[in-house]
Image (cartoon, rainbow, N blue to C red):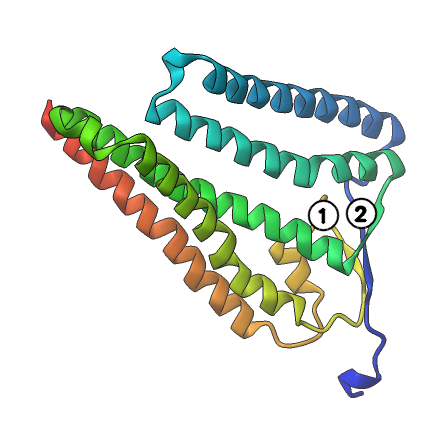
Amino acid sequence: MELNNLTTVTEFFLLGFRVSQDLRISMFLIFFVIYCGTICGNLLIITLVSTSKNLHTPMYFFISHLSISDIVVTTDIVPNMLHILLNNGGTMTFTDCIAQLYFLCASEAFECFLLAVMSYDRYVAICNPLRYTFIITSASCVILAAICWSLGFSVVLIYIIMISKLFFCGPNIIDHLFCDIGPLLGIACSDTFLVQLDIYIIGFIVVFIPTKIIVVSYTYIVLQF
């Protein structure tokens, strides 16, 4: 049968945990407490860094951005996951699913880039202490953070757009807690080879380049001693 004659899926049903109701309620309470603790902890870090003059340093500036990214990731996934736990499953529209996947992947990519920047910051601070204040200025920190956010939300957009153009004709059941790449591609009716290839290429760039910077930076730091 031609794809054009098949019904297009407009929403997905996420199964979540297929366990007893009592266990689901217990898991809901545990995840809810962890979520609240995560949000409060990260907000506390952001508040302290913003208000305390002693913490107005590049390292804490970058840490506050990691906290913002952590809030984005947890808020993107956990509230809907809690809803799924309470209702023994839940539906998400195609648009919501793609949006959730986008913010998850973009935040993860951002964190990879920012960790590389933080390792470079430590390298300059330890290996070139006399030039540290000249190289790592307030303006350069803002620029580096902006570049990390821009890269994180732009590189993943390439394959997110490709995923959004895939054809889904059923089944619309995702055996997962949220819209992740693997389960989503697994139920696509159209060919996913190019999407998977693009994901591997971008994933390699996002992981390999920051990892190389981190390894080189800390290698120089260790050799310094």
Nearer the observer, 184 or 11: 11
For residue 15, which numbered disc appears in the image?
A: 2
Question: In this rendering, does residue 116 appear at all?
Answer: yes
Does the residue at mark 1 contact the one at mark 2 (Cβ under 8 Å)? yes
Q: Earlier in the sequence, mark 1 or mark 2?
A: 2
| Quadrant of the rendered image containing residue 131 | top left
Residue at the disc numbered 1? 176
Counting other residues with Cα less than 10 Å from the Cα at mark 2, is it few (<14), some (14-19), or many (20 or more)? Answer: some
Image quarter where the N terminus lies is bottom right
Indicate the position of residue 3 as horizontal and vertical percent values.
76, 83
Nearer the observer, 83 or 115: 115
For residue 219, which numbered disc appears in the image?
A: none
Residue shown at 47% from the left, 32% from the top:
65
Task: Decide: is 42 above or below 75.
Answer: above
The amino acid at mark 2 is Leu
Report the Cα–Cα distance between label 1 and label 2: 6 Å
Q: Is 205 displayed left or right of 69 in the figure?
A: left
Secondary structure, mark 1, is: loop
Nearer the observer, 102 or 184: 102
| Quadrant of the rendered image containing residue 68 | top right
Counting other residues with Cα less than 10 Å from the Cα at mark 1, is it few (<14), some (14-19), or many (20 or more)? Answer: some
Secondary structure, mark 2, is: loop
Residue at the far front in the pictured view: 139
